[in-house]
């Protein structure tokens, strides 16, 4: 008999919490994909302050952990998100749509950390080396709790 894995439950809960934080902002919606996951979990669609669509979107890969997320000992201004598959990061090589990594802890599911991974040398190098699993560093200042504006500003900059 098939058994649901704890890792799948953690991932599903993380996606739900990130989706809730994004949608609660009123300036964006999270469109989740069902079916096969080829590297991202959904799309953020951005709206202007009047609630009109802007046409700006971003691919989102959500990683979840049941552990607390802590800054790195040797670089306390960064955290590390492990377990990214090489194949899912191929989206980082394109320049047309921002590819966002969101990292959430189920211990503090009211916030998530984010990074835009497009064309980052560390990610491209790991892809080129065909590393099986990749860790991505995220600045601790890139945290979303209630105010989604910093992330929306990053998406806006991508389209300028």
Image (cartoon, helix red, strand yellow):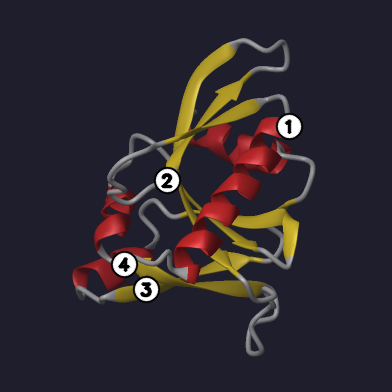
Q: Earlier in the sequence, mark 3 or mark 4?
A: 4
* Of labels 3 and 2, the one closer to you: 2
Return the mark for residue 134. Answer: 3
Question: Label 4 vs label 1: CA separation?
Answer: 41 Å
Is label 1 in contact with label 2 (beta carbons under 8 Å)?
Answer: no
- Which residue occupies the foreground of this view, 129 or 60? 60
Q: Disc 2 marks which residue?
A: 41
Residue at left 58%, top 55%? 14
How many residues crowd around disc 2 within 10 Å: few (fewer than 14), some, or many (20 or more)?
Answer: some
Residue at left 61%, top 73%? 79
Residue at far right of view: 146
How many residues crowd around disc 4 within 10 Å: few (fewer than 14), some, or many (20 or more)?
Answer: few
State which quadrant residue 71 falls in.
bottom right
Residue 115 percent location from the top left of the image: 54, 55
Q: Earlier in the sequence, mark 4 or mark 1?
A: 4
How many residues crowd around disc 3 within 10 Å: few (fewer than 14), some, or many (20 or more)?
Answer: some
Residue 87 percent location from the top left of the image: 24, 60
Q: Disc 4 marks which residue?
A: 1
* Residue at disc 1, secondary structure: loop
State which quadrant residue 77 falls in.
bottom right
Is label 1 in contact with label 3 (beta carbons under 8 Å)?
Answer: no
* Residue at disc 3, secondary structure: strand
Question: Label 3 vs label 4: CA separation?
Answer: 32 Å
How many residues crowd around disc 1 within 10 Å: few (fewer than 14), some, or many (20 or more)?
Answer: few
Q: Is residue 9 left or right of residue 73?
A: left
Q: Earlier in the sequence, mark 2 or mark 4?
A: 4
In the rendered view, tell whether residue 97 sits above or below residue 39. Answer: above
Question: Label 1 vs label 2: CA separation?
Answer: 19 Å
Question: Label 3 vs label 2: CA separation?
Answer: 17 Å
* Of labels 3 and 4, the one closer to you: 4
Q: Earlier in the sequence, mark 1 or mark 2?
A: 1
């Amino acid at each position: 008999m098939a058994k649901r894995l704890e890792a799948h439950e953690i991932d599903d809960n993380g996606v739900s919490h990130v989706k809730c934080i994004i949608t609660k902002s009123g300036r964006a919606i999270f469109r989740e994909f069902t079916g096969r996951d080829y590297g991202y979990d959904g799309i953020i669609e951005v709206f202007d302050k009047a609630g009109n669509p802007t046409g700006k979107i971003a691919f989102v890969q959500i990683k979840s952990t049941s552990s607390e997320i802590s800054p790195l000992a040797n670089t306390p201004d960064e955290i590390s998100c492990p377990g990214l598959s090489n194949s899912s990061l191929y989206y980082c090589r394109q320049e047309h749509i921002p590819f966002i990594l969101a990292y959430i802890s189920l211990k503090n599911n009211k916030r998530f950390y984010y990074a835009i991974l497009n064309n980052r040398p560390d990610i491209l190098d790991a892809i080129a080396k065909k590393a099986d699993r990749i860790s991505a560093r995220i600045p601790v200042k890139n945290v979303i709790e209630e105010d989604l504006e910093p992330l929306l500003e990053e998406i806006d900059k991508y389209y300028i």
